[in-house]
Image: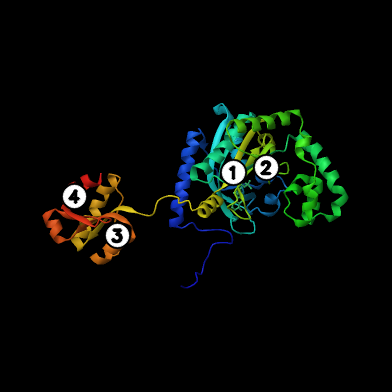
Amino acid sequence: MAQAKYTTHLGMVDILPDEVRKWQFLENLIREEAATFNFEEIRTPIMEQTELIVRGLGQLTDIVSKEIFSFSRGEDNYVLRPELTAPVVRAFVEHHLDQRGGSQKLFYIGPMFRAERPQKGRQRQFHQFGLEVLGSSDAVADVEVIAFMIHIYNKIGIKNTTLKLNSIGDPDSREKYKEALKAHLKPNFEKLSEISKKRYEKNPLRILDSKEEEDQPFIKNAPVITDYLNEDSLAHYAKVKEYLTDLNIQFEEDPYLVRGMDYYTQTAFELISPDLGAQDALAGGGRYDLLVEEIGGQPTPAVGFAAGMERLLIACEELGIELGSEKKVDVYIVTLGDAARKWGLSQLPKLREKGVSATMDYMGRSMKAQMKDANRENAQYTIIVGENELNEGRFTFRNMKESEESSLSFEEILDKLL
Ligand code: AMP
């Protein structure tokens, strides 16, 4: 086959029809389950103001410093959204969603963009689904968010997952911890990786997330944040653990778990799958009690998670979980001659109106070729029409799987199909 002249950009992937069926299955499932948890869908634009993302996620995060797709047009600076928490918060503030009363329970599904080095489970355009609860500081919200996340994977059949849990405290606790962490790293500062050296002053917590070999010995015996949590943070963390235990949701505490955005406070979590290889995080999230205020809203506590759709699909494939059904159509009208073709075209709407999916040949093929095409399309039934059938008003109705045929009027066929 000739090489295509135009291809997708690096790390950007076409989702072809056979794959789309799996996506639709997952999207439907997520929407249905979100409704059972009483969450409402929110959709925001693909592009946001650069300033929102920089302020929201933090200047020194990998996403903002290295991975953002940005461009300008006239005076305006745009970025392709790298995640949806900051955009959802922007929408919450912009449209005064707090005035709807209660806590806002929102979910989303859509594409995100990060200029990362592509590999399995890591793309430049990828898709996330996620939840955000705005307006509650109660540990019930943290636990409902986590419960939904795990519920989705369980529902699909991905049960071998590990929930990693940590609290990164409030800013007060975190400041104390940062000092302790810096004091611990200081004697070996010169041995740290270049990137960790850069993070040492302004964002030392991110060093804990470093994948660089030379940093590992110093991370391994670093002080743990949980020893630096103040009373409020400890109490919140204890409640989250208590409620998770009540719900029988197992978790593994990981005091070095920090997340990739600066907006997190208190609870942080990640869902890991052993079936994913190097990129083993299915989903992650946490509290972000200060973000709404940071971008100009009233102080509003919030918690959420985001999950990667591509990684969910990879896990399903690894586990042999089939998603969605194969391609099929209820009826294929096979026609011989112009009059039959005209008749076929005019019957299609009558079938579709009744909810019966129906198609016919678009290419003027022979009857034999049309039957072959009907098989390829996985048609459940064919209606075979030639001049005789038209004259008599009776058509050959064939059950393709059973290879059974009968001669019926169109009304009788409709009766059989419904
Ligand atoms: P994050 O927004 O970084 O917390 O990521 C949440 C989830 O999104 C991760 O656990 C992954 O499943 C998924 N994810 C993040 N970045 C990518 C990417 N570049 N390609 C594919 N999936 C991603």
Q: Are marks 1 and 2 in contact (CB under 8 Å)?
A: no
Could one spot residue 6 in this view of the protein?
A: yes
Query: Residue farthest to the top?
Result: 101
Say which of marks 1 and 2 sits in front.
1
Q: Residues within 10 Å of mark 3 (few under 14, many from 20)?
A: many
Q: Is residue 239 above or below residue 376?
A: above
**Label 1 vs 2, first from the N-terminus:** 2
Mark 3: amino acid? Ala
Q: Are marks 4 and 2 in contact (CB under 8 Å)?
A: no
Residue ID for mark 4: 410
Mark 4: amino acid? Phe
Percent x, y for residue 74?
63, 52
Distance from Cα at disc 4 to Cα at disc 1: 51 Å
Distance from Cα at disc 4 to Cα at disc 3: 19 Å
Query: Residue farthest to the left?
Result: 392
Q: Residues within 10 Å of mark 2 (few under 14, many from 20)?
A: many
Mark 1: amino acid? Ala
Mark 2: amino acid? Gly
Residue ID for mark 3: 374
Quarter of the image with the C terminus is top left
Taking the image as shown, residue 37 lies to the left or right of residue 175, namely: left
Residue ID for mark 2: 56
**Label 4 vs 1, first from the N-terminus:** 1
Q: Is mark 1 within 8 Å of ligand 1?
A: yes
- Report which quarter residue 287 is drawn in: top right
Residue ID for mark 1: 306
